[in-house]
Amino acid sequence: MIRFEHVTKRYADGTTAVDDLSFEVAEGELVTLVGPSGCGKTTTMKMVNRLIEPTSGRILVDGEDIATVDPVRLRRRIGYVIQQVGLFPHKTVLENTAAVPHLLGWQRKRARERAAELLDLVGLDPSVYGDRYPDQLSGGQRQRVGVARALAADPPVLLMDEPFGAVDPVVREHLQTEFLRLQSQVRKTVLFVTHDIEEAVRLGDRIAVYGNGRIEQLDAPAAVLGAPATPYVADFVGADRGLKRLSVTTIEAGDLEQPPVVHLDDRLSEAAERLDLEGARWAVVLDDSDRLHGWISAEAAQAAAGAGAVRVRDRARRMDAWLPLGASLKQAFSTMLQHDAGWIAVLDGESADHFLGVLTPARLHEALRRSIEADARGRSRSEAQVETVPGL
Ligand SMILES: Nc1ncnc2c1ncn2[C@@H]1O[C@H](COP(=O)(O)OP(=O)(O)OP(=O)(O)O)[C@@H](O)[C@H]1O
């Protein structure tokens, strides 16, 4: 969809900002450009909408050499979101969002309807925010209007230059999550510039690590973190890249442990016996329809059997936290911490009504090590062998 062929940009003062760059972004793909300040990310991006012209080489958008396309016509096909947003201060949120369709000659009513639809899509209720002016919004809300505005004319390509750079880390993470949800619906071809490796890893289908006008590595986030191509990339992604992988490594069925499972209506004495027989300290408790209810400890089951309690439901404890298969290890770890839990139940991703097993901290650690080993050896995670120093 976007193709760079031997593109070089040398500024008038002799600075080579981009040096013989060749790569391609597929249709519907989100590629993050990440690297330290001054390495050529913004120059790369601005050449796509012809705000900057390359010194040599060519760029194709949807098969067409953009040097031959009128810049104004080209920019209609390319949404552009920047850090400073650049909303018109004297226009309302709705008018700002409708600005591009308006320029394209859409009828006023249709442009406003489309703008309202997009505000809704980026999480801003148009009936609440539509008539406000930009200075009546928070920084995060202004960024969302920027994204809505860039999407208003439904361009196939989006260029985003540090769009979430100016907001605090909590709002930033929130905007990233919403943007991922949005992108899964609209599937634009996106080039996304950031100097934050965490953001690059979280958002990118692939990430391009820049160093001095060149791409040092272009690969899936897990591969860049697991097997950096050069010492420069290893240094840039950081010594804690194992930890960063938590957010891009997903829970697989093979990672789960299978504790004993009992049902709410089972007799406590039988549950106690089962736990004893299997040498387990607790069991997962499911309801009649096999949905997760919580857990019961071996102690509670044994003690209660003599104290008038009859059924598992009399002593079972609730556990509301669970994760779908395919959630990230980072989500699993943070959910465990949030609930002071030594395990987290994993349910079937689609309907979330089928209990699959539990993830424990030890299994989480093993899954992470396996995924690193698997990437380094080009194998699947289930084939990777890891040796573990035995615990106490
Ligand atoms: N108009 C210009 N004239 C001369 N040099 C320029 C010009 N614009 C950018 N540069 C230089 O080109 C190089 C790449 O700049 P660019 O803005 O593309 O980097 P970047 O990776 O986006 O940086 P940042 O993360 O700080 O925005 C830098 O050395 C910069 O100083």
Image: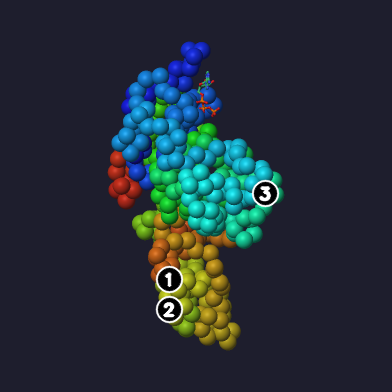
**Mark 1 close to ligand 1, CB under 8 Å:** no
Local secondary structure at mark 2: loop
Q: In this view of the protein, which residue sits in the foreground, 169 or 323?
A: 169
Q: Is residue 358 visible?
A: no
Q: Are marks 2 and 1 in contact (CB under 8 Å)?
A: yes
Residue type at the position of mark 1: Asp
Pointer 3: what residue?
Answer: 133
Instruction: Check the image and name the residue furthest to the right.
Output: 136
The local crowd at label 2, few if under 14, some if 14 to 19, many if 20 or more residues have their Cα within 10 Å, is few
Residue type at the position of mark 2: Ser
Q: Earlier in the sequence, mark 1 or mark 3?
A: 3
Going 45% across and 17% down the picture, which residue do you hit?
Answer: 10
Pointer 1: what residue?
Answer: 353
Q: Position of residue 220 (x, y in %)?
A: 38, 40
Q: Position of residue 231 (x, y in %)?
A: 43, 26
Mark pair 3, 2: CA separation = 51 Å
Quadrant housing the N terminus: top left
Does residue 43 appear left or right of residue 172 in this picture? left
Going 42% across and 41% down the picture, which residue do you hit?
Answer: 77
Mark pair 1, 3: CA separation = 45 Å
Q: Earlier in the sequence, mark 3 or mark 2?
A: 3
Mark pair 2, 1: CA separation = 8 Å
Q: Position of residue 392 (x, y in %)?
A: 49, 50
Q: Quadrant of residue 60?
A: top left
Does residue 170 appear left or right of residue 191 in this picture? right
